[in-house]
Image: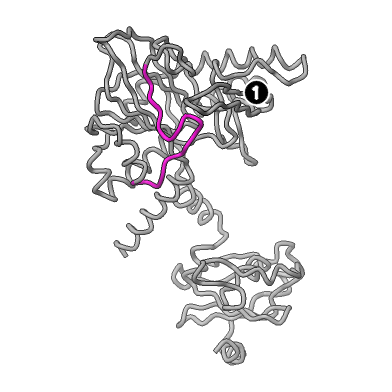
């Protein structure tokens, strides 16, 4: 069938590409008219199309992945000899300079079009939702959304809305969860699975004598991210309130540190540079049960990707090591920049107090969180159960839910 398609190619009324013009173009684009969009042209680099041939020699449908044979001796000079479209079958046919022939369905071509609008749509609608940053209590009340625990367990639509909101705004509150110790495990299993750390899969936050972690004290807990000493930082923090202190304390504090970083970039660009380029030693040394540990990770406070977008925030005063392995002249500028960052974080933070049955969920790569101190007595107990789930697992589940929703509506 594949050979017959190649022979038939010459007899089909072809729309020939302006090959000479393409060869002169350093990008060597293949332009494909799309009759479903008023003949607006889809555009593709020729080498990319060759790499993504859909035939059985190049692509394995059951794994949804390309086969590696082409890359055993990749010809980077490969180019189109001839192309044609079958408008009735909605297929693009290409003969290549390496003797290969390919067919591409129009549906697939539309999904992978290199136009700026299509690339932007894929990155924000499918890869990861576009973030919306927020500031302080007034913004928090605007973006604050509550989800019902039982709805998340029984409704895929509710589950998708929760994960979407969490991805966009970095925080969401779940209400009416049972006062039982398996709530977080059930909720995480609904998404995928928990992230295990040196403190186990779940951790209990309450005042403890001889605490091995600063969070286990009743003292004020300053704004921080959880576990910055891990290279693979836990992505989403879930905190289930079992008991809440009746004292005025125990109030949650939250700030969108990506928003704070934006302010720093705008108002204090040199200090922003310092916090993005100065590596800091983060550490956690101790024991939890029978496990003894000594975790260290070196990274700046503000971490950016290759395009300058925020990846993660690292900050925890108790877990910033006394080792500061940088040149002497970088030390004081870092302290000055960090003081500005924390001042802005406090200025743009919000506060609220959870109730028993609440599950506070937030992006641990983006938000800094803390709490006010509280009185801890036999009659006045604050007990929070915590767990983590990785963003890879959240995004995967969100894409699966979106695809199912899209299939149901089509």
Tag count: 1
Q: Look at mark 1 in the image and give the residue it sits on.
A: 281
What span is colored magenta in the figure? 190-206
Residue at 47% across, 18% down: 223
The percent position of residue 46, horizontal first and vertical second, equals: 66, 68
What secondary structure predominates along the stretch shown in magenta? loop
The magenta stretch spans residue 14: no
Residue at 27% across, 10% down: 378
Query: What quarter of the picture does the N terminus occupy?
Result: bottom right
Let me know if residue 110 appears in the view.
Answer: yes
Q: In which quarter of the image is residue 173?
A: top left
Name the foreground residue: 266 vs 385: 385
The percent position of residue 167, horizontal first and vertical second, equals: 42, 40
Task: Determine whether, in the image, residue 220 is placed left or right of residue 178.
Answer: right
Residue at 67% across, 80% down: 100
Label 1: which secondary element:
strand
Q: In which quarter of the image is residue 215?
A: top left
Image position of 231 with respect to 220: above or below: below
Name the foreground residue: 397 vs 323: 323
Colour scheme in the image?
A: one colour
Residue at 55% across, 16% down: 317
The percent position of residue 109, horizontal first and vertical second, equals: 52, 68
Query: What quarter of the picture does the C terminus occupy?
Result: bottom left
The percent position of residue 194, horizontal first and vertical second, equals: 42, 40
Let me know if residue 346 appears in the view.
Answer: no
Q: How crowded is mark 1: few (under 14 residues within 10 Å), some or many (20 or more)?
A: some
């Amino acid at each position: 069938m594949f050979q017959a398609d190649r022979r038939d190619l010459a007899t089909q009324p072809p729309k020939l590409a302006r090959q000479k013009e393409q060869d002169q173009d350093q990008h060597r684009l293949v332009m494909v008219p799309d009759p479903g969009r008023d003949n607006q042209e889809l555009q593709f680099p020729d080498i990319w199309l060759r790499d993504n041939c859909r035939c059985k020699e190049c692509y394995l449908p059951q794994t949804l992945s390309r086969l590696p044979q082409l890359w055993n001796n990749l010809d980077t000079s490969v180019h189109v000899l001839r192309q044609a479209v079958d408008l009735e079958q909605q297929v693009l046919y290409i003969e290549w300079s390496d003797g290969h022939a390919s067919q591409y369905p129009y549906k697939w071509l539309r999904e992978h079009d290199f136009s700026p609008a299509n690339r932007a749509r894929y990155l924000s609608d499918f890869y990861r939702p576009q973030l919306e940053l927020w500031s302080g209590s007034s913004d928090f009340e605007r973006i604050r959304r509550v989800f019902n625990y039982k709805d998340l367990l029984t409704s895929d639509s509710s589950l998708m809305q929760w994960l979407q909101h969490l991805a966009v705004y970095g925080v969401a509150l779940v209400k009416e969860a049972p006062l039982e110790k398996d709530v977080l495990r059930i909720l995480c299993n609904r998404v995928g699975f928990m992230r295990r750390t040196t403190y186990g899969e779940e951790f209990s936050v309450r005042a403890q004598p001889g605490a091995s972690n600063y969070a286990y004290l009743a003292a004020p807990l300053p704004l921080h991210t959880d576990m910055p000493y891990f290279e693979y930082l836990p992505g989403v923090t879930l905190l289930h309130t079992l008991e809440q202190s009746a004292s005025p304390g125990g109030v949650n504090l939250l700030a969108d540190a990506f928003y704070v970083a934006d302010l720093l970039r705008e108002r204090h660009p040199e200090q922003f540079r310092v916090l993005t380029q100065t590596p800091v030693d983060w550490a956690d040394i101790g024991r939890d049960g029978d496990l003894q540990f000594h975790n260290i990770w070196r990274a700046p406070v503000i971490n950016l990707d290759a395009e300058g977008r925020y990846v993660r925030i690292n900050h925890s005063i108790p877990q910033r090591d006394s080792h500061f392995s940088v040149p002497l002249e970088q030390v004081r500028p870092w302290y000055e920049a960090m003081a500005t960052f924390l001042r802005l974080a406090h200025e743009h933070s919000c506060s609220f107090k959870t109730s028993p049955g609440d599950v506070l969920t937030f992006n641990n790569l983006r938000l800094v969180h803390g709490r006010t101190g509280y009185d801890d007595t036999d009659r006045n107990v604050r007990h929070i159960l915590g767990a983590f789930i990785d963003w890879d697992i959240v995004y995967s589940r969100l894409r699966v839910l979106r695809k199912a929703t899209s299939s149901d509506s089509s």
